[in-house]
Image (spheres, coloured by chain):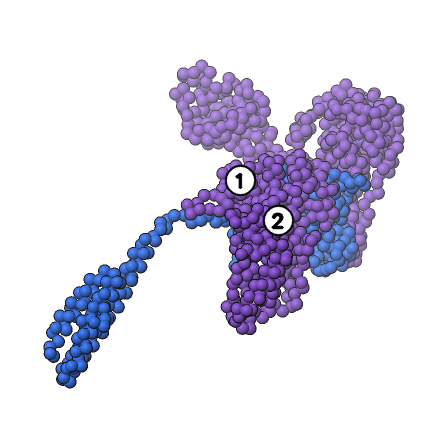
Chain colours: A blue, B purple
């Protein structure tokens, strides 16, 4: 009875049953018939007790080995059947992954606010704060304090919107520039001053390059030594930072503004690239801003002594800067709320203009 | 201001090219607007010589010409009747653009009736250099072949147009321009002193200045026996070049002097004058007169007129009347050269709408020392070209005080500009501009020329010096960085706007910027515009008041986008609204709109509702730093919101931070907007100021419970008018330490719920901290919740 050949036969038989089990229930039936209490292998193992020690020495390990091998085969077959069942289940869950996702509307930020944030970053780095003031102004802040004498032709250049006069006959104006905020800031009397003033301004004019409302950014520096060389340096630094180029070439032309003396306009060398401009090359000059040393009358009007305090100011169009940098051809589109335009020229809310990661 | 180059060169001795002169003007502050240079414009056209003109073999009216041109001998077929052998004409090469015909010649020779033509000979009209089209230009004398056509025609004079800034009326005279250019070193100012012409008889006209504030000085003279007529060619050409129409010599000469010296004059027909001439206030209807623009005016008492005993003769310094104007028959004239107050002139100009060259000059400030010189300059020309006999010149009144001397420390130039200029250069520039610097020390006493009323203080002289020396020579110096660490400069409001904008854009809204003004009747839909916020001169009647809300433009933009087929547009703006006309009457408001539109999607979609608007408002408020947990919700939105689907978010009973909901369908209808719209408005100013930071930015300790939270559900039957918020607050209040959250997970008013009631199901989260809760403890809390909620809501626990 020490012949193990019948064990081989049995193993082959059970293995074939395992391989043939179509599902887990069938497989369990095979397990019971071979390894269950009354299973063929179990019955054979029960016989071991009746054997001589010599026979047991042969048959014991052989039967144990058989049991282990069959158990392994059963486990492997079980894992295999489970995997197949899962595969089948997953196959039934298949979807067409080319179907479109649920729409998520994409929001955006307006180029004007983007440019204003860029300005704030560039000038914050130079020590400027951002100041603001009201859109509805009085004559004093918009004109008189800025050295526009009443009845002076310089007032005609501003295309001013007036409010209907109040009971005293006084007319408020819509500020024609952001310069009234210079006055409001200086009147607070705290020096030195380094501010930029972005905001809405209004002029009674409407065509392809003018809208009755647009945006300006004003700059003001007041201390005891800021001179025109600093003005030039500041603006060149700004242009280089804003247009993200090292090659700024600027031209300062004398001009006249009532609130600065000397006054200048700044042109930059540029060439057109589509609707945008490339600053620093080309053979054309483009007027980009007006500037000058703050007029002593203005300093005086704000209660400061122009022999002690001095400084400079400038003003430029924010919308225009946006047009030039980002290539939007028509100013009127800035205020049209056309979603296609907003999507095209707008900016991701994830973008935060800063010096570490860039302006845009 | 326009002037031909030749006129400038009458005053300025220079070899500089047109380009150099333009550059010098630009860099001295005379901003060029346009240069009309015929040499450039007509560069293609040059003189040619017709060697031989013979009959075209195949066409009666055509001639075949052999022509000597700058490009060599050419065969040109010409249809002009005057084309003939030996003539000098104007040649246009192949490819040239012919302005009068508005087309360019072919680049290759074309056959005309079988004969090749290599170019064209032009008529004056074809070049837009004249009206003549009877034949080709037939130059009266030989010119060298290749001479620019405009040179041969005497039409090569460039005309420069530049911007005169309001501070420089002296640039309204060509001599003033020449003076500034001479100072830049590009040439020298020629001496054209005006000589006094002695009179041979006393001036028969007397002048009385009844309103010296408006007309403080008046010079005049009579010239008898003049023969008025057409002006000489040089004068007509000069006037045409600057866009003036020649009239007759006496009129033309006043225009010429106005442009030459910024010295407006007026000439009266002496025969029409009756009694003394007065410069006085207008007398209304009694002064009604017809001015030279052929319109009638009624001068008011704030307007300065020139009048005699019987007639108002014109507005002083603005425009004369037709009655006393000179004609070709005029023989005796009275010349006026006065000075009129800029403000009076400007006010009269505005009131009457007259914008004459004289008014333009007087309102900016004509040289007050110039009246007599004006008379003399005019007299010289009149006597020379019209003959006659001059009276003595009278000067009545006193000119306004000349500008005061300026104490000018030389160091001011460096202080304000950074330019370190030697004394000599400063003095040279000032003198070249007509100033009179005196003194040897560090402070000059600078006499100001009478024509520079704009210069009153040191900074004005600094500008003159820096401007003429050249702004381009200023060294650019970067502004030194502040030496100390600074706080981030953004203000609380700027940060609120910035974060609110990003929150909304992140939620799918596109930021836009819309007009600050709107239409009165649209504003009325939203409570009306604030007091004092109606525009006197709106750009259009649709933008005539300051907006009380940004909703108007956003709603109409929403519709416009929908009309363009844009699906689910969502727009927002963070911008001002205007409550009053005071400096504190403006609010910064974040406003958003979207349509109630579900869209379509294969997996199904959800119709947006008031809770989406509420979520957007809450998200923007939280981003902007509002205390989101403390906000109360109340159905108290104003009347332009849907009465049942809108609300406010507020802190306390008064401080409304936001309104949200559906816009009232009646409002949408009034604005012509289809469908329904969800919106919100957040007043960023109303968010309370954050507490002052303590300095350290360390966070408080993290409270992280170790034990698992326990959830219990409750359903209550309550009246339909009981806000869910009441139940949530009551439940939370049952045990503030233990209850960490209360949410509503079901709202049901269907079968089984009595009429007028609703079932609200709450999930309460209990967060034990020290030890696991026992069943008894949980039951105790549950009982407290039920009791609190029932008491607060008047409802009952649903069994």
Q: Position of residue B344 (x, y in %)?
A: 80, 36
Can residue B516 be seen from the camera position used here?
no
Q: Residues within 10 Å of mark 2 (few under 14, many from 20)?
A: few
How far apart are labels 2 and 1 at the CA level? Answer: 38 Å
Splitting the image into 4 quarters, where does residue A230 fall? bottom right
* Nearer to me, B521 or B384: B521
> Above or below — where is A50 with respect to B505?
below
Asked which secondary structure carries label 1, the reply is helix
Residue holding disc 2: B721
Q: Residues within 10 Å of mark 1 (few under 14, many from 20)?
A: many
Splitting the image into 4 quarters, where does residue B559 fall? top right
Residue drawn at x 33%, y 56% as measured from the top left = A90
> Of the residues under marks 2 and 1, which one precedes in the sequence?
1
Chain of residue at mark 2: B
> Which of the numbered marks, if any, corresponds to residue A11?
none
Residue drawn at x 14%, y 73% as measured from the top left = A7
B514 relative to A45 in the view: left or right: right
A307 relative to B742 in the view: left or right: right
Q: Across the whole image, how many numbered discs are drawn on residues?
A: 2
- Give yes or no for contact between labels 2 and 1 (Cβ–Cβ under 8 Å): no
Asked which secondary structure carries label 2, the reply is loop
Residue drawn at x 44%, y 49% as measured from the top left = A102
Q: Position of residue B347 (x, y in %)?
A: 78, 35
Residue pushed farthest top?
Answer: B60
Q: Are marks 2 and 1 on the same chain?
A: yes
Residue drawn at x 66%, y 30% as measured from the top left = B243
Residue holding disc 1: B561
Can residue B675 be seen from the camera position used here?
yes
> Above or below — where is B587 with respect to B742?
above
From the image, which quarter does the N terminus of chain B lie in? top right
């Amino acid at each position: 009875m020490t012949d193990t050949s019948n064990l081989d036969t049995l193993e082959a038989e059970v293995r074939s049953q395992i391989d043939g089990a179509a599902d887990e229930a069938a497989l369990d039936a095979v397990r019971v018939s071979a390894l269950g209490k009354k299973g063929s292998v179990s019955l054979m193992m029960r016989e071991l007790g009746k054997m001589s020690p010599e026979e047991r020495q042969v048959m014991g390990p052989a039967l144990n080995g058989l049991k282990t091998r069959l158990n392994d085969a059963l486990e492997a077959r079980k894992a295999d059947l489970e995997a197949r069942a899962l595969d089948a289940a997953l196959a039934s869950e298949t979807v067409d992954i080319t179907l479109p996702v649920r729409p998520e509307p994409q929001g955006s930020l307006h180029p004007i606010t983007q440019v204003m944030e860029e300005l704030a970053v560039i000038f914050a780095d130079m020590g400027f704060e951002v100041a603001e003031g009201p859109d509805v102004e009085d004559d004093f802040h918009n004109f008189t304090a800025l050295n526009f004498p009443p009845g002076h032709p310089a007032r005609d250049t501003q295309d001013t919107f007036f409010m209907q006069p109040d009971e005293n006959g006084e007319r408020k104006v819509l500020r024609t520039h952001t310069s009234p905020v210079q006055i409001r800031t200086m009147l607070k009397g705290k020096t030195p001053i380094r501010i930029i003033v972005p905001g809405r301004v209004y002029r009674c004019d409407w065509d392809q390059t003018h809208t009755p409302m647009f945006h300006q950014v004003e700059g003001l520096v007041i201390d005891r030594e800021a001179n025109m060389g600093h003005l030039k340096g500041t603006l060149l630094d700004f242009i280089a930072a804003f247009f993200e180029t090292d090659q700024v070439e600027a031209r300062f032309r004398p001009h006249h503004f009532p609130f600065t003396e000397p006054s200048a306009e700044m042109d930059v060398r540029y060439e057109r690239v589509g609707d945008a401009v490339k600053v620093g090359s080309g053979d054309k000059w483009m007027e980009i801003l007006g500037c000058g040393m703050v007029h002593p009358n203005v300093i005086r009007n704000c209660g400061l002594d122009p022999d002690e305090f001095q400084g400079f100011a400038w003003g430029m169009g924010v919308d225009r800067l946006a047009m030039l940098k980002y290539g939007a051809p028509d100013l009127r589109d800035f205020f049209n709320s056309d979603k296609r335009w907003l999507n095209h020229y707008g900016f991701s809310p994830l973008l935060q203009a800063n010096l570490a990661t860039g302006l845009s | 201001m326009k002037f031909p180059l030749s006129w400038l060169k009458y005053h300025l001795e220079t070899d500089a090219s047109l380009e150099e002169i333009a550059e010098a003007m630009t860099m001295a502050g005379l901003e060029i607007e346009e240069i009309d240079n015929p040499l450039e414009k007509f560069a293609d056209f040059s003189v040619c010589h017709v060697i031989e003109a013979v009959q075209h073999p195949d066409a009666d009216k055509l001639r075949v010409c052999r022509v000597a041109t700058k490009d060599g001998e050419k065969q040109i077929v010409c249809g002009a009747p005057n084309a003939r052998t030996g003539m000098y004409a104007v040649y246009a090469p192949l490819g040239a653009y012919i302005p009068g015909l508005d087309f360019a010649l072919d680049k290759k020779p074309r056959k005309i009736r079988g004969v090749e033509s290599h170019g064209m000979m032009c008529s004056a009209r074809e070049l837009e250099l004249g009206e003549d089209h009877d034949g080709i230009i037939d130059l009266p004398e030989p010119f060298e072949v290749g001479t620019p056509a405009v040179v041969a025609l005497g039409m090569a004079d460039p005309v420069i147009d530049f911007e005169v800034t309001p501070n420089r009326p002296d640039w309204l005279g060509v001599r003033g321009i020449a003076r500034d250019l001479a100072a830049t070193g590009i040439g020298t100012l020629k001496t054209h002193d005006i000589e006094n012409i002695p009179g041979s008889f006393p001036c028969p006209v007397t002048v009385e200045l009844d309103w010296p504030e408006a007309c403080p000085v008046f010079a005049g003279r009579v010239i008898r026996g003049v023969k008025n007529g057409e002006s000489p060619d040089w004068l007509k050409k000069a006037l045409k070049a600057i866009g003036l129409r020649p009239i007759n010599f006496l009129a033309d000469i006043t225009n010429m002097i106005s442009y030459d010296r910024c010295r407006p004059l007026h000439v009266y027909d002496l025969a029409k004058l009756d009694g003394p001439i007065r410069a006085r206030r207008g007398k209304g209807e009694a002064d009604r007169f017809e001015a030279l623009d052929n319109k009638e005016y009624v001068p008011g008492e704030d307007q300065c007129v020139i009048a005699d005993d019987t007639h108002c003769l014109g507005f002083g310094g603005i425009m004369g009347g037709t009655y006393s104007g000179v004609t070709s028959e005029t023989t005796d004239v009275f010349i006026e050269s006065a000075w009129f107050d800029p403000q009076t002139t400007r006010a009269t100009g505005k009131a009457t709408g007259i914008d004459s060259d004289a008014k333009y000059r007087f309102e900016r400030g004509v040289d007050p020392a110039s009246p007599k010189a004006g008379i003399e300059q005019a007299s010289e020309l009149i006597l020379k070209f019209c003959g006659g006999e001059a009276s003595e010149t009278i000067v009545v009144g006193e000119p306004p005080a000349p500008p005061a001397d300026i104490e000018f420390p030389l160091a001011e130039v460096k202080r304000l500009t950074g330019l370190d200029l030697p004394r000599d250069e400063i003095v040279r520039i000032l003198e070249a501009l007509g100033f009179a610097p005196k003194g040897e020390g560090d402070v000059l006493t600078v006499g100001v020329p009478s024509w520079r009323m704009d210069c009153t203080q040191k900074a004005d002289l600094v500008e003159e010096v820096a401007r003429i020396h050249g702004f381009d020579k200023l060294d650019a110096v970067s502004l030194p960085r502040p030496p100390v660490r600074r706080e981030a400069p953004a203000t609380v409001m700027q940060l609120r706007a910035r974060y609110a904008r990003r929150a909304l854009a992140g939620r799918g809204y596109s930021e836009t910027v819309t007009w600050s003004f709107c239409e009165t009747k649209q504003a009325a839909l939203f409570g009306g515009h604030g007091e004092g916020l109606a525009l006197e001169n709106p750009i259009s009647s649709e933008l005539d008041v300051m907006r009380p809300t940004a909703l108007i433009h956003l709603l109409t933009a929403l519709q416009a986008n929908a009309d363009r087929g844009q699906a689910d547009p969502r727009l927002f703006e963070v911008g001002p609204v205007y409550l009053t006309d005071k400096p504190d009457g403006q609010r910064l408001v974040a406003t958003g709109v979207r349509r109630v539109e579900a869209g379509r999607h294969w997996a199904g979609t959800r119709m947006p509702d008031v809770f989406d608007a509420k979520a957007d408002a809450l998200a923007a408020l939280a981003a902007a730093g509002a205390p989101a947990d403390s906000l109360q919700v109340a159905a108290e939105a104003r009347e332009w919101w849907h009465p049942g689907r809108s609300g406010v978010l507020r802190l306390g009973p008064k401080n409304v931070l936001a309104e949200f909901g559906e816009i009232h369908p009646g409002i949408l209808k009034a604005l012509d907007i289809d469908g329904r719209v969800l919106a919100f408005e957040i007043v960023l100013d109303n968010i309370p100021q954050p507490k002052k930071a303590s300095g350290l930015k360390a966070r408080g300790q993290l409270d992280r419970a170790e034990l698992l939270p326990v959830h219990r559900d409750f359903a209550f039957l309550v009246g339909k008018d009981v806000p869910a918020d009441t139940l949530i607050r009551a439940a939370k209040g049952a045990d503030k330490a233990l209850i960490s959250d209360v949410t509503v997970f079901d709202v049901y008013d269907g079968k089984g719920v009595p009429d007028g009631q609703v079932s609200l199901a709450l999930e309460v989260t209990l967060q034990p901290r020290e030890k696991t809760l026992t069943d008894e403890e949980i039951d105790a809390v549950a009982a407290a919740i039920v009791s609190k909620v029932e008491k607060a809501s008047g409802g009952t626990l649903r069994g």
